[in-house]
Image (cartoon, rainbow, N blue to C red):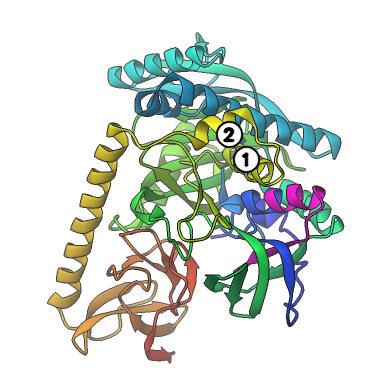
Amino acid sequence: MTSYWLDTHPVPERGTPIEAGERHDTVVVGAGLTGVVTALLLARAGQRVCLLEARSVGAVTTGNTSAKASLLQGANLSQVRRHHGEEALGAYVHANLAGQSWLREYMVDHGLAHQVRTAFSYADTHEGVRRLDAEVDAANAAGLPVDWAAETGLPYPVAGAIALAAQLQLHPTLLLAALLDEALATGVVLHTGCRVHDLAVRGGCQVTTTAGTVSADRVVLATGTPILDRGGHFARLAAQRSYALAFRVHGHLPQGMYLSIDEPTRSLRTTPSPDGEVLIVGGNGHPVGRHGSTRELVADLEAWTTGIFPSAVRTHAWSAQDYRPAGRLPLVDVLPLSNGRVVAATGYAKWGMTNAVASALRIAGRWAGAEHAWARVLDDVHASFADLAEGTRSNAEVALAASRGWIAGEATALEGDPGEGRGVVGRLGGRPAARSRVDGVTCTVSGVCTHLGGVLAWNDQERSWDCPLHGSRFDASGRVLEGPAVDDLEVLGGESG
Protein backbone atom coordinates (compact mmCIF):
# COMPACT_ATOMS: atom_id res chain seq x y z
CA MET A 1 0.00 0.00 0.00
CA THR A 2 2.00 2.95 -1.29
CA SER A 3 0.40 6.37 -0.88
CA TYR A 4 -0.19 8.70 -3.78
CA TRP A 5 2.32 11.09 -2.19
CA LEU A 6 5.16 8.58 -1.77
CA ASP A 7 4.51 7.17 -5.25
CA THR A 8 4.55 10.51 -7.07
CA HIS A 9 7.33 12.16 -5.06
CA PRO A 10 9.37 9.79 -2.89
CA VAL A 11 11.83 11.55 -0.60
CA PRO A 12 15.33 10.84 -1.97
CA GLU A 13 17.54 8.68 0.24
CA ARG A 14 20.20 10.92 1.79
CA GLY A 15 21.30 9.08 4.95
CA THR A 16 24.90 8.35 5.95
CA PRO A 17 26.35 5.67 8.28
CA ILE A 18 26.77 6.42 11.99
CA GLU A 19 30.39 7.16 12.86
CA ALA A 20 32.17 5.84 15.95
CA GLY A 21 32.02 8.33 18.83
CA GLU A 22 29.49 10.56 17.03
CA ARG A 23 28.25 13.43 19.19
CA HIS A 24 25.81 16.30 18.62
CA ASP A 25 24.01 18.99 20.56
CA THR A 26 20.61 17.42 19.82
CA VAL A 27 19.44 14.08 18.43
CA VAL A 28 15.98 14.07 16.86
CA VAL A 29 14.42 10.61 16.53
CA GLY A 30 11.88 10.30 13.73
CA ALA A 31 12.13 11.88 10.27
CA GLY A 32 8.53 12.86 9.69
CA LEU A 33 7.31 16.45 9.58
CA THR A 34 7.79 17.05 13.32
CA GLY A 35 11.31 15.67 13.33
CA VAL A 36 12.56 17.33 10.15
CA VAL A 37 11.18 20.78 11.03
CA THR A 38 12.56 20.50 14.58
CA ALA A 39 15.98 19.51 13.25
CA LEU A 40 15.92 22.40 10.74
CA LEU A 41 14.91 25.00 13.34
CA LEU A 42 17.58 23.87 15.79
CA ALA A 43 20.23 23.82 13.05
CA ARG A 44 19.23 27.34 12.00
CA ALA A 45 19.83 28.36 15.62
CA GLY A 46 23.39 27.06 15.39
CA GLN A 47 23.03 23.64 16.98
CA ARG A 48 24.74 20.48 15.78
CA VAL A 49 21.80 18.20 15.05
CA CYS A 50 21.46 14.52 14.17
CA LEU A 51 18.25 13.09 12.70
CA LEU A 52 17.64 9.36 13.21
CA GLU A 53 15.02 7.41 11.26
CA ALA A 54 14.20 3.71 11.67
CA ARG A 55 12.92 3.32 8.11
CA SER A 56 13.05 6.08 5.49
CA VAL A 57 12.13 9.78 5.61
CA GLY A 58 8.35 10.22 5.60
CA ALA A 59 7.70 6.47 5.68
CA VAL A 60 5.04 6.57 8.38
CA THR A 61 2.42 9.25 9.07
CA THR A 62 3.74 12.21 7.05
CA GLY A 63 3.96 10.20 3.83
CA ASN A 64 0.45 8.86 4.33
CA THR A 65 -1.49 11.90 5.54
CA SER A 66 -4.36 13.67 3.77
CA ALA A 67 -2.14 16.79 4.01
CA LYS A 68 -4.77 19.34 5.01
CA ALA A 69 -3.25 22.22 6.98
CA SER A 70 -6.56 23.49 8.32
CA LEU A 71 -7.77 25.27 11.44
CA LEU A 72 -11.24 23.82 10.90
CA GLN A 73 -10.73 20.37 12.38
CA GLY A 74 -13.99 18.46 12.61
CA ALA A 75 -15.20 18.73 16.22
CA ASN A 76 -11.73 19.24 17.67
CA LEU A 77 -12.02 22.87 18.79
CA SER A 78 -15.19 22.31 20.80
CA GLN A 79 -13.59 19.25 22.38
CA VAL A 80 -10.51 21.23 23.43
CA ARG A 81 -12.82 23.88 24.88
CA ARG A 82 -14.86 21.29 26.79
CA HIS A 83 -11.77 19.65 28.25
CA HIS A 84 -9.67 22.72 29.05
CA GLY A 85 -11.59 25.97 28.68
CA GLU A 86 -11.21 29.21 26.77
CA GLU A 87 -7.57 30.04 27.49
CA ALA A 88 -6.26 26.64 26.38
CA LEU A 89 -8.51 26.75 23.30
CA GLY A 90 -7.08 30.15 22.36
CA ALA A 91 -3.52 28.88 22.81
CA TYR A 92 -4.26 25.79 20.71
CA VAL A 93 -5.68 27.91 17.90
CA HIS A 94 -2.69 30.28 18.03
CA ALA A 95 -0.34 27.28 17.91
CA ASN A 96 -2.08 25.95 14.81
CA LEU A 97 -2.11 29.39 13.21
CA ALA A 98 1.64 29.60 13.84
CA GLY A 99 2.15 26.18 12.28
CA GLN A 100 -0.01 26.98 9.27
CA SER A 101 1.62 30.39 8.73
CA TRP A 102 5.09 28.87 8.93
CA LEU A 103 4.14 26.25 6.34
CA ARG A 104 2.54 28.79 4.02
CA GLU A 105 5.54 31.12 4.19
CA TYR A 106 7.98 28.24 3.65
CA MET A 107 6.15 26.96 0.59
CA VAL A 108 5.83 30.42 -0.95
CA ASP A 109 9.50 31.25 -0.30
CA HIS A 110 10.67 27.96 -1.81
CA GLY A 111 8.28 27.91 -4.76
CA LEU A 112 6.52 24.74 -3.61
CA ALA A 113 3.10 24.00 -5.08
CA HIS A 114 0.19 24.32 -2.66
CA GLN A 115 -3.44 25.33 -2.83
CA VAL A 116 -5.56 27.70 -0.75
CA ARG A 117 -9.02 26.24 -0.25
CA THR A 118 -12.13 26.69 1.87
CA ALA A 119 -12.38 23.97 4.52
CA PHE A 120 -15.81 22.48 5.26
CA SER A 121 -17.03 20.31 8.10
CA TYR A 122 -20.43 18.82 7.36
CA ALA A 123 -23.07 16.70 9.07
CA ASP A 124 -25.46 14.01 7.86
CA THR A 125 -27.55 13.81 11.05
CA HIS A 126 -29.33 16.11 13.48
CA GLU A 127 -26.81 15.16 16.17
CA GLY A 128 -24.02 16.08 13.76
CA VAL A 129 -25.61 19.49 13.17
CA ARG A 130 -25.70 20.03 16.93
CA ARG A 131 -21.97 19.26 17.11
CA LEU A 132 -21.29 21.65 14.23
CA ASP A 133 -23.10 24.36 16.16
CA ALA A 134 -20.78 23.79 19.13
CA GLU A 135 -17.80 23.96 16.78
CA VAL A 136 -18.90 27.30 15.32
CA ASP A 137 -19.29 28.68 18.84
CA ALA A 138 -15.84 27.44 19.91
CA ALA A 139 -14.14 28.68 16.75
CA ASN A 140 -15.71 32.13 17.05
CA ALA A 141 -14.72 32.31 20.72
CA ALA A 142 -11.13 31.71 19.63
CA GLY A 143 -11.30 34.37 16.90
CA LEU A 144 -11.73 32.11 13.87
CA PRO A 145 -14.34 33.33 11.34
CA VAL A 146 -16.12 29.97 11.02
CA ASP A 147 -19.74 30.23 9.87
CA TRP A 148 -22.55 28.16 8.42
CA ALA A 149 -22.23 27.42 4.71
CA ALA A 150 -25.17 27.76 2.36
CA GLU A 151 -23.38 25.77 -0.36
CA THR A 152 -20.58 23.19 -0.14
CA GLY A 153 -19.98 22.21 -3.75
CA LEU A 154 -20.44 18.55 -2.81
CA PRO A 155 -22.45 16.42 -5.28
CA TYR A 156 -24.65 15.03 -2.49
CA PRO A 157 -26.93 16.61 0.11
CA VAL A 158 -25.86 17.25 3.70
CA ALA A 159 -27.85 18.18 6.80
CA GLY A 160 -25.61 21.15 7.52
CA ALA A 161 -22.09 22.46 6.94
CA ILE A 162 -19.71 25.05 8.35
CA ALA A 163 -16.79 26.67 6.55
CA LEU A 164 -13.48 28.46 7.07
CA ALA A 165 -11.88 30.18 4.09
CA ALA A 166 -8.21 30.43 3.09
CA GLN A 167 -6.95 27.12 4.45
CA LEU A 168 -3.97 25.25 3.06
CA GLN A 169 -3.55 21.92 1.28
CA LEU A 170 -0.26 20.56 0.00
CA HIS A 171 1.81 17.62 -1.24
CA PRO A 172 3.47 16.33 1.96
CA THR A 173 6.46 14.47 0.56
CA LEU A 174 7.26 17.31 -1.83
CA LEU A 175 7.38 19.58 1.23
CA LEU A 176 9.34 17.05 3.30
CA ALA A 177 12.00 16.66 0.59
CA ALA A 178 12.52 20.44 0.43
CA LEU A 179 12.72 20.70 4.23
CA LEU A 180 15.24 17.86 4.34
CA ASP A 181 17.38 19.46 1.64
CA GLU A 182 17.61 22.67 3.66
CA ALA A 183 18.21 20.80 6.91
CA LEU A 184 21.12 18.87 5.43
CA ALA A 185 22.52 22.04 3.83
CA THR A 186 22.33 23.70 7.27
CA GLY A 187 24.44 20.94 8.81
CA VAL A 188 21.92 18.35 10.03
CA VAL A 189 23.32 14.81 9.90
CA LEU A 190 20.81 12.16 8.76
CA HIS A 191 20.99 8.45 9.56
CA THR A 192 18.24 6.23 8.13
CA GLY A 193 17.55 2.53 8.58
CA CYS A 194 18.63 2.63 12.23
CA ARG A 195 16.05 1.84 14.87
CA VAL A 196 16.59 3.23 18.37
CA HIS A 197 16.68 0.50 21.01
CA ASP A 198 17.87 2.29 24.11
CA LEU A 199 18.24 5.79 25.54
CA ALA A 200 20.43 6.44 28.57
CA VAL A 201 20.65 9.78 30.36
CA ARG A 202 23.90 10.00 32.32
CA GLY A 203 25.62 13.37 32.09
CA GLY A 204 24.10 13.65 28.63
CA CYS A 205 22.17 11.33 26.35
CA GLN A 206 23.39 8.13 24.74
CA VAL A 207 21.11 6.88 21.96
CA THR A 208 21.71 3.25 21.02
CA THR A 209 20.47 2.15 17.61
CA THR A 210 20.71 -0.95 15.46
CA ALA A 211 23.57 0.76 13.58
CA GLY A 212 25.57 2.28 16.43
CA THR A 213 25.43 4.79 19.28
CA VAL A 214 25.09 8.57 19.07
CA SER A 215 25.60 10.96 22.00
CA ALA A 216 23.97 14.35 22.53
CA ASP A 217 23.05 16.90 25.15
CA ARG A 218 19.33 16.57 24.34
CA VAL A 219 16.95 14.23 22.51
CA VAL A 220 13.61 14.84 20.78
CA LEU A 221 11.32 11.83 20.29
CA ALA A 222 9.23 12.62 17.21
CA THR A 223 8.11 9.07 16.51
CA GLY A 224 4.32 9.32 16.40
CA THR A 225 4.03 7.76 19.82
CA PRO A 226 7.13 7.91 22.00
CA ILE A 227 9.41 4.90 21.93
CA LEU A 228 11.21 4.08 25.20
CA ASP A 229 8.33 5.91 26.88
CA ARG A 230 9.03 7.03 30.43
CA GLY A 231 6.08 9.39 30.47
CA GLY A 232 3.28 6.86 30.14
CA HIS A 233 2.15 8.38 26.85
CA PHE A 234 0.84 5.00 25.68
CA ALA A 235 -1.77 5.17 28.44
CA ARG A 236 -2.84 8.69 27.42
CA LEU A 237 -3.10 8.06 23.69
CA ALA A 238 -5.55 6.09 21.55
CA ALA A 239 -3.93 4.68 18.40
CA GLN A 240 -6.19 5.12 15.38
CA ARG A 241 -5.83 3.76 11.86
CA SER A 242 -7.66 5.23 8.86
CA TYR A 243 -7.61 4.74 5.10
CA ALA A 244 -7.22 6.86 1.98
CA LEU A 245 -7.73 6.23 -1.72
CA ALA A 246 -6.75 8.21 -4.80
CA PHE A 247 -9.03 8.30 -7.86
CA ARG A 248 -9.06 9.54 -11.42
CA VAL A 249 -12.47 11.06 -12.07
CA HIS A 250 -13.98 12.43 -15.27
CA GLY A 251 -15.77 15.75 -14.96
CA HIS A 252 -15.97 18.40 -12.28
CA LEU A 253 -14.69 17.76 -8.76
CA PRO A 254 -15.61 19.71 -5.60
CA GLN A 255 -12.93 22.30 -4.83
CA GLY A 256 -13.01 22.53 -1.06
CA MET A 257 -11.44 20.45 1.69
CA TYR A 258 -14.19 18.39 3.31
CA LEU A 259 -14.64 16.36 6.48
CA SER A 260 -17.81 14.74 7.77
CA ILE A 261 -18.46 15.04 11.48
CA ASP A 262 -20.59 11.87 11.69
CA GLU A 263 -19.40 8.28 11.53
CA PRO A 264 -18.19 6.75 9.34
CA THR A 265 -15.94 9.70 8.62
CA ARG A 266 -15.44 10.87 5.05
CA SER A 267 -12.60 13.19 4.05
CA LEU A 268 -12.32 14.65 0.56
CA ARG A 269 -9.84 16.89 -1.22
CA THR A 270 -8.28 17.13 -4.66
CA THR A 271 -4.67 17.49 -5.71
CA PRO A 272 -3.31 18.64 -9.08
CA SER A 273 -1.32 16.27 -11.27
CA PRO A 274 0.12 16.50 -14.81
CA ASP A 275 -2.92 14.55 -16.05
CA GLY A 276 -5.54 16.60 -14.23
CA GLU A 277 -6.94 16.68 -10.74
CA VAL A 278 -6.85 13.62 -8.51
CA LEU A 279 -9.53 13.00 -5.89
CA ILE A 280 -8.31 11.89 -2.44
CA VAL A 281 -10.95 10.23 -0.25
CA GLY A 282 -10.27 9.09 3.31
CA GLY A 283 -12.12 7.68 6.26
CA ASN A 284 -13.30 4.50 8.01
CA GLY A 285 -10.99 5.03 10.97
CA HIS A 286 -10.87 2.55 13.85
CA PRO A 287 -8.70 1.64 16.85
CA VAL A 288 -5.57 -0.17 15.68
CA GLY A 289 -5.88 -3.97 15.76
CA ARG A 290 -9.58 -3.96 16.65
CA HIS A 291 -11.36 -4.52 13.35
CA GLY A 292 -12.09 -7.90 11.87
CA SER A 293 -11.24 -7.05 8.26
CA THR A 294 -9.45 -3.88 7.25
CA ARG A 295 -9.75 -4.98 3.64
CA GLU A 296 -13.52 -4.59 3.97
CA LEU A 297 -13.04 -1.01 5.18
CA VAL A 298 -11.04 -0.14 2.06
CA ALA A 299 -13.63 -1.84 -0.16
CA ASP A 300 -16.41 0.09 1.60
CA LEU A 301 -14.59 3.40 1.06
CA GLU A 302 -14.12 2.61 -2.63
CA ALA A 303 -17.77 1.59 -3.02
CA TRP A 304 -18.93 4.81 -1.36
CA THR A 305 -16.72 6.90 -3.67
CA THR A 306 -17.80 5.20 -6.89
CA GLY A 307 -21.41 5.56 -5.76
CA ILE A 308 -20.92 9.33 -5.59
CA PHE A 309 -18.53 9.63 -8.55
CA PRO A 310 -19.47 6.82 -10.98
CA SER A 311 -16.50 7.47 -13.27
CA ALA A 312 -13.96 7.19 -10.45
CA VAL A 313 -11.09 4.74 -11.01
CA ARG A 314 -8.91 3.92 -8.04
CA THR A 315 -5.17 4.37 -8.55
CA HIS A 316 -3.79 4.17 -4.99
CA ALA A 317 -4.84 2.89 -1.57
CA TRP A 318 -3.01 3.44 1.69
CA SER A 319 -3.48 4.01 5.40
CA ALA A 320 -2.07 6.13 8.20
CA GLN A 321 -1.79 5.92 11.96
CA ASP A 322 -2.57 8.76 14.31
CA TYR A 323 -2.73 9.14 18.07
CA ARG A 324 -5.59 10.88 19.85
CA PRO A 325 -4.77 12.21 23.33
CA ALA A 326 -7.41 11.96 26.04
CA GLY A 327 -7.31 15.75 26.54
CA ARG A 328 -7.36 16.59 22.80
CA LEU A 329 -4.25 18.78 23.14
CA PRO A 330 -0.95 17.57 21.64
CA LEU A 331 1.48 16.20 24.21
CA VAL A 332 4.80 18.04 24.01
CA ASP A 333 6.44 16.94 27.24
CA VAL A 334 9.80 16.65 28.96
CA LEU A 335 10.03 12.98 29.88
CA PRO A 336 10.33 12.11 33.58
CA LEU A 337 13.75 10.95 34.84
CA SER A 338 15.52 12.60 31.89
CA ASN A 339 16.93 15.64 33.73
CA GLY A 340 15.03 17.84 31.30
CA ARG A 341 17.04 16.45 28.38
CA VAL A 342 14.40 14.41 26.54
CA VAL A 343 11.24 15.84 24.97
CA ALA A 344 8.49 13.87 23.23
CA ALA A 345 5.94 15.33 20.79
CA THR A 346 2.81 13.37 19.92
CA GLY A 347 -0.99 13.31 20.01
CA TYR A 348 -2.02 15.35 16.97
CA ALA A 349 -5.38 13.56 16.59
CA LYS A 350 -5.14 13.48 12.76
CA TRP A 351 -4.23 17.19 12.48
CA GLY A 352 -0.50 16.75 12.11
CA MET A 353 0.26 19.26 9.36
CA THR A 354 -0.28 22.29 11.61
CA ASN A 355 0.37 20.61 14.96
CA ALA A 356 3.68 19.04 13.87
CA VAL A 357 5.11 22.42 12.91
CA ALA A 358 3.64 24.04 16.04
CA SER A 359 5.34 21.35 18.16
CA ALA A 360 8.67 21.97 16.40
CA LEU A 361 8.31 25.73 16.99
CA ARG A 362 7.47 25.00 20.62
CA ILE A 363 10.49 22.76 21.21
CA ALA A 364 12.96 24.98 19.36
CA GLY A 365 11.63 28.10 21.10
CA ARG A 366 11.95 26.49 24.52
CA TRP A 367 15.55 25.43 23.97
CA ALA A 368 16.54 28.68 22.26
CA GLY A 369 15.13 30.79 25.09
CA ALA A 370 12.46 32.34 22.85
CA GLU A 371 9.32 30.52 23.92
CA HIS A 372 6.04 31.60 22.34
CA ALA A 373 3.27 32.95 24.56
CA TRP A 374 0.84 30.27 23.34
CA ALA A 375 3.42 27.59 24.19
CA ARG A 376 3.67 28.80 27.78
CA VAL A 377 -0.11 28.51 28.14
CA LEU A 378 -0.09 24.98 26.72
CA ASP A 379 2.81 24.00 28.98
CA ASP A 380 0.68 24.93 31.99
CA VAL A 381 -2.38 22.89 31.01
CA HIS A 382 -3.07 19.99 33.36
CA ALA A 383 -5.32 16.98 33.02
CA SER A 384 -8.98 17.86 33.52
CA PHE A 385 -11.76 15.68 34.89
CA ALA A 386 -12.89 15.08 31.30
CA ASP A 387 -9.34 13.95 30.41
CA LEU A 388 -9.25 11.52 33.33
CA ALA A 389 -12.68 10.13 32.51
CA GLU A 390 -11.78 9.58 28.86
CA GLY A 391 -8.41 8.10 29.79
CA THR A 392 -10.14 5.69 32.16
CA ARG A 393 -12.54 4.57 29.43
CA SER A 394 -9.71 4.16 26.94
CA ASN A 395 -7.59 2.10 29.31
CA ALA A 396 -10.59 -0.06 30.20
CA GLU A 397 -10.97 -0.80 26.48
CA VAL A 398 -7.26 -1.66 26.30
CA ALA A 399 -7.60 -4.02 29.25
CA LEU A 400 -10.61 -5.68 27.63
CA ALA A 401 -8.73 -6.06 24.33
CA ALA A 402 -5.78 -7.58 26.19
CA SER A 403 -7.99 -10.09 28.00
CA ARG A 404 -9.87 -11.11 24.86
CA GLY A 405 -6.64 -11.45 22.90
CA TRP A 406 -5.06 -13.82 25.40
CA ILE A 407 -8.21 -15.91 25.71
CA ALA A 408 -8.53 -16.25 21.94
CA GLY A 409 -4.78 -16.77 21.46
CA GLU A 410 -4.70 -19.70 23.85
CA ALA A 411 -8.04 -21.27 22.98
CA THR A 412 -7.00 -23.07 19.79
CA ALA A 413 -3.80 -24.81 18.77
CA LEU A 414 -1.94 -23.25 15.82
CA GLU A 415 -2.05 -25.70 12.95
CA GLY A 416 -1.70 -25.74 9.19
CA ASP A 417 -1.25 -23.04 6.56
CA PRO A 418 -3.61 -20.05 6.86
CA GLY A 419 -3.83 -19.47 3.11
CA GLU A 420 -2.48 -16.67 0.93
CA GLY A 421 -2.92 -13.20 2.40
CA ARG A 422 -4.25 -14.50 5.68
CA GLY A 423 -2.92 -14.63 9.23
CA VAL A 424 -4.07 -16.63 12.26
CA VAL A 425 -3.18 -16.65 15.94
CA GLY A 426 -3.18 -19.81 18.04
CA ARG A 427 -1.41 -21.70 20.78
CA LEU A 428 2.06 -23.04 20.02
CA GLY A 429 4.27 -24.40 22.78
CA GLY A 430 1.94 -23.00 25.44
CA ARG A 431 1.89 -19.40 24.19
CA PRO A 432 0.17 -17.38 21.43
CA ALA A 433 1.87 -17.59 18.05
CA ALA A 434 1.04 -15.81 14.79
CA ARG A 435 1.26 -17.50 11.39
CA SER A 436 0.74 -15.81 8.04
CA ARG A 437 1.23 -16.49 4.36
CA VAL A 438 2.27 -13.54 2.20
CA ASP A 439 3.38 -13.81 -1.44
CA GLY A 440 3.73 -17.55 -1.09
CA VAL A 441 5.87 -17.40 2.04
CA THR A 442 4.59 -18.79 5.35
CA CYS A 443 6.11 -17.37 8.51
CA THR A 444 5.42 -18.09 12.17
CA VAL A 445 6.33 -15.51 14.79
CA SER A 446 5.44 -14.78 18.39
CA GLY A 447 1.87 -13.59 18.65
CA VAL A 448 2.69 -11.32 21.59
CA CYS A 449 3.60 -7.65 21.10
CA THR A 450 7.08 -6.76 22.35
CA HIS A 451 5.82 -3.51 23.88
CA LEU A 452 3.47 -4.56 26.69
CA GLY A 453 2.40 -8.07 25.78
CA GLY A 454 -0.80 -7.61 23.79
CA VAL A 455 -1.85 -10.51 21.56
CA LEU A 456 -1.64 -9.41 17.94
CA ALA A 457 -4.35 -9.27 15.28
CA TRP A 458 -3.94 -9.80 11.53
CA ASN A 459 -4.45 -6.77 9.28
CA ASP A 460 -5.64 -8.32 6.01
CA GLN A 461 -5.36 -5.13 3.95
CA GLU A 462 -1.77 -4.27 4.89
CA ARG A 463 -0.74 -7.85 5.72
CA SER A 464 0.72 -6.90 9.05
CA TRP A 465 0.40 -7.90 12.70
CA ASP A 466 -1.20 -5.07 14.69
CA CYS A 467 -1.42 -4.69 18.46
CA PRO A 468 -4.88 -3.74 19.78
CA LEU A 469 -3.42 -2.28 22.99
CA HIS A 470 -1.20 0.65 21.99
CA GLY A 471 -0.85 0.44 18.21
CA SER A 472 2.50 -1.26 17.59
CA ARG A 473 2.64 -2.88 14.16
CA PHE A 474 4.89 -5.56 12.68
CA ASP A 475 5.30 -6.93 9.16
CA ALA A 476 4.55 -10.57 8.37
CA SER A 477 8.12 -11.62 9.22
CA GLY A 478 7.94 -9.88 12.61
CA ARG A 479 9.88 -6.67 11.93
CA VAL A 480 8.67 -3.54 13.72
CA LEU A 481 6.83 -1.11 11.45
CA GLU A 482 5.63 1.55 13.90
CA GLY A 483 4.26 2.25 17.34
CA PRO A 484 5.89 2.19 20.78
CA ALA A 485 7.53 -1.24 20.29
CA VAL A 486 11.26 -1.19 19.49
CA ASP A 487 11.97 -4.94 19.31
CA ASP A 488 10.99 -7.32 16.51
CA LEU A 489 8.83 -10.36 17.14
CA GLU A 490 10.59 -13.63 17.85
CA VAL A 491 10.59 -15.90 14.79
CA LEU A 492 9.24 -19.31 15.80
CA GLY A 493 8.88 -21.25 12.59
CA GLY A 494 11.11 -19.55 10.05
CA GLU A 495 9.92 -18.99 6.50
CA SER A 496 8.73 -21.58 4.02
CA GLY A 497 7.56 -21.28 0.48
Q: What is the C-alpha distance between the residues marked 1 and 2?
A: 6 Å
Disc 1 residue type? Arg
Q: Is residue 436 above or below residue 52?
A: below
Quadrant of res 283: top left
Q: Which residue is mark 1?
A: 362
Circles 1, 2 touching at the beta carbon (< 8 Å): yes
Q: Is residue 423 above or below residue 415?
A: above
- Residue 475 position within the rendered picture, expressed as x and y whole percent measured from the top left: 46, 72
Q: Which residue is mark 2?
A: 375
- Residue 225 position within the rendered picture, expressed as x and y whole percent measured from the top left: 47, 55
Secondary element type, mark 2: helix
Query: In front: 289, or 7?
Result: 289
Q: Is residue 3 left or right of residue 331?
A: right
Magenta stretch contains residue 80: no
Magenta-drawn segment: 38-54
Q: Quadrant of the C terminus?
A: bottom left
Residue at 65%, 80% in the rendered image: 212
Magenta stretch contains residue 50: yes
Secondary element type, mark 1: helix
- Residue 471 position within the rendered picture, expressed as x and y whole percent measured from the top left: 39, 59
Quadrant of res 450: bottom left
The dot on residue 25 is: none
Q: Is residue 240 above or below residue 388?
A: below
- Residue 271 position within the rendered picture, expressed as x and y whole percent measured from the top left: 67, 37
